[in-house]
């Protein structure tokens, strides 16, 4: 199939961008003709392209700024339309809401089926639900059942139009048997218990609740909290300064970082679809503590594949840390069970197989609708 994957952001090293890249790479390796479009930003690092190494994917950078009612936006839409019209794609798959809006406008009057991805549990209001209800969108791919439920409830979307396909993880990259030097790099001794997390320090990730929970935990046990992600501000470090907390900053070698953890903890409070770093930690067989937000409970089954705790509750998070620490054999089982669940439901190959079926069905139904329209006209 000739496929266009499009996202209107200039950084791919985040959830939606990474998932689009994994899908595009897998489809290209299977022999499909894949083009990727993402937002052109001269300040973006060219290292983003490393996500598409060793593939035959064509990468197009177009200016896809936030949709506004002005001449610049019109030029962007017309530029995208011209490209789509020339290429004659079998299907277009938009990732994130802005890309979906742009593609709908750019393909008005064009004969191509559209697939839209939805990866967050933000409620839909009347205006931002219109694009998902339009007939231009043949299928909506929700990254978790929780996302689908919110779309149906708040956006009044027909549930038959929404298909749940979990995000994926590369099991060869996230291999629990890899060797790591991350502890040595950070100066952490082997007798220190390491609780780690990966992600940005935005409020929705609940990092302050995680820190408060760890502070209580570390008063009783020899431990370190390692936070891998966006560099914190000096104000943040000053406020949450602790000799047992290590802020690492952004890293590309996430598997190496995860391999050094004894436990992975996620304290998010809202807007998750199904947290990518939780999925990656599961692939690494780590015992996981996660807040029960959005779709995370679809992967972390309490006391089977990890521990679920209420959000905004550092006491519950601390108690979960203590439980994992005191029950190492059970914690090991949690990690092994989580890896098995990922292998059964969240590999690149499983995801690509489901999405290709969606593409094929969309193309077939679109072609049938066009044939029937021509028949009626005849």
Image (spheres, rainbow, N blue to C red):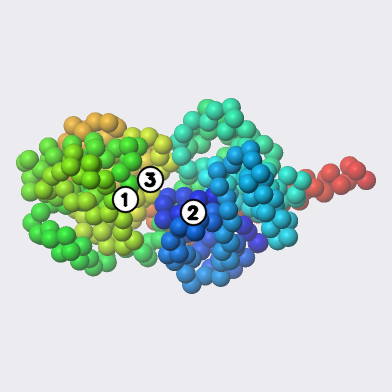
> In the rendered view, would you say 281 is above or below 298?
below
Report the Cα–Cα distance between label 1 and label 3: 16 Å
Report the Cα–Cα distance between label 2 and label 1: 16 Å
Camera-near label (1 vs 3) is 1
Which of the pair 208/73 is nearer the observer? 73
Say which element carries label 1. Answer: loop
Q: Is residue 93 left or right of residue 43?
A: right
Which of the pair 61/25 is nearer the observer? 61
Q: Can residue 138 be seen in this snapshot?
A: no
> In the rendered view, would you say 155 is above or below 359?
above
Q: Is residue 366 left or right of residue 353?
A: right
Q: Mark 3 highlights which residue?
A: 275
> In the rendered view, would you say 37 is above or below 316?
below
Q: Name the residue: 54% across, 50% down.
A: 8
Q: Position of residue 61 (x, y in %)?
A: 57, 59
Report the Cα–Cα distance between label 2 and label 3: 21 Å
Say which element carries label 3. Answer: loop
> Quarter of the image containing the N terminus?
bottom right
Camera-near label (2 vs 3) is 2
Q: Mark 1 highlights which residue?
A: 230
Q: Mark 2 highlights which residue?
A: 10
Q: Can residue 91 be seen in this snapshot?
A: yes
Q: Is residue 370 left or right of residue 8?
A: right
- Few, some or many residues within 10 Å of mark 1 (<14, 14–19, 20+): some
- Few, some or many residues within 10 Å of mark 3 (<14, 14–19, 20+): many
Label pair 2/3, CB-CB below 8 angstroms: no
Q: How many marks?
A: 3
Q: Which label was assigned to residue 102?
A: none
């Amino acid at each position: 199939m000739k496929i266009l994957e499009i996202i209107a952001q200039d950084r791919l090293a985040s959830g939606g961008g990474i998932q689009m890249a994994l899908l595009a790479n897998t489809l290209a390796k299977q022999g499909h003709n894949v083009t990727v479009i993402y937002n052109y930003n001269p300040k973006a690092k060219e290292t983003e392209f490393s996500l598409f190494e060793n593939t035959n994917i064509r990468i197009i950078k177009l200016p896809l700024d936030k949709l506004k009612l002005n001449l610049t936006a019109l030029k962007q839409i017309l530029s995208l339309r011209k490209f789509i019209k020339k290429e004659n794609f079998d299907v277009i798959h938009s990732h994130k809401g802005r890309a979906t809006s742009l593609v709908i406008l750019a393909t008005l009057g064009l004969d191509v089926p559209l697939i839209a991805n939805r990866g967050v549990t933000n409620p839909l209001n009347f205006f931002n639900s219109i694009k998902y209800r339009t007939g231009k969108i043949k299928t909506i791919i929700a990254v978790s059942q929780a996302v689908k439920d919110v779309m149906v409830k708040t956006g009044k979307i027909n549930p038959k139009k929404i298909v749940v396909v979990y995000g994926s993880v590369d099991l060869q990259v996230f291999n629990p048997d890899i060797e790591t030097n991350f502890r040595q790099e950070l100066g952490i001794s082997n007798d220190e218990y390491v609780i780690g997390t990966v992600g940005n320090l935005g409020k929705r990730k609940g990092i302050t609740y995680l820190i408060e929970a760890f502070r209580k935990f570390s008063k009783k046990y020899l431990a370190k909290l390692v936070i891998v992600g966006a560099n914190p501000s000096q104000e943040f470090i000053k406020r949450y300064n602790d000799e047992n907390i290590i802020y690492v900053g952004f890293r590309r070698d996430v598997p190496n970082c995860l391999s050094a953890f004894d436990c992975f903890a996620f304290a998010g409070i809202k807007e998750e679809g199904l947290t990518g770093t939780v999925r990656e930690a599961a692939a690494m067989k780590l015992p996981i503590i996660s807040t029960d937000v959005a779709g995370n409970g679809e992967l972390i089954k309490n006391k089977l594949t990890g521990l679920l705790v209420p959000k905004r509750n550092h006491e519950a998070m601390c108690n979960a840390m203590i439980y994992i620490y005191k029950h190492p054999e059970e914690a090991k089982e949690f990690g092994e069970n989580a890896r098995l669940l990922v292998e059964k439901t969240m590999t690149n190959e499983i995801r690509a197989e489901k999405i290709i079926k969606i593409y094929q069905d969309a193309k077939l139904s679109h072609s049938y609708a066009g044939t029937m329209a021509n028949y009626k006209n005849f």
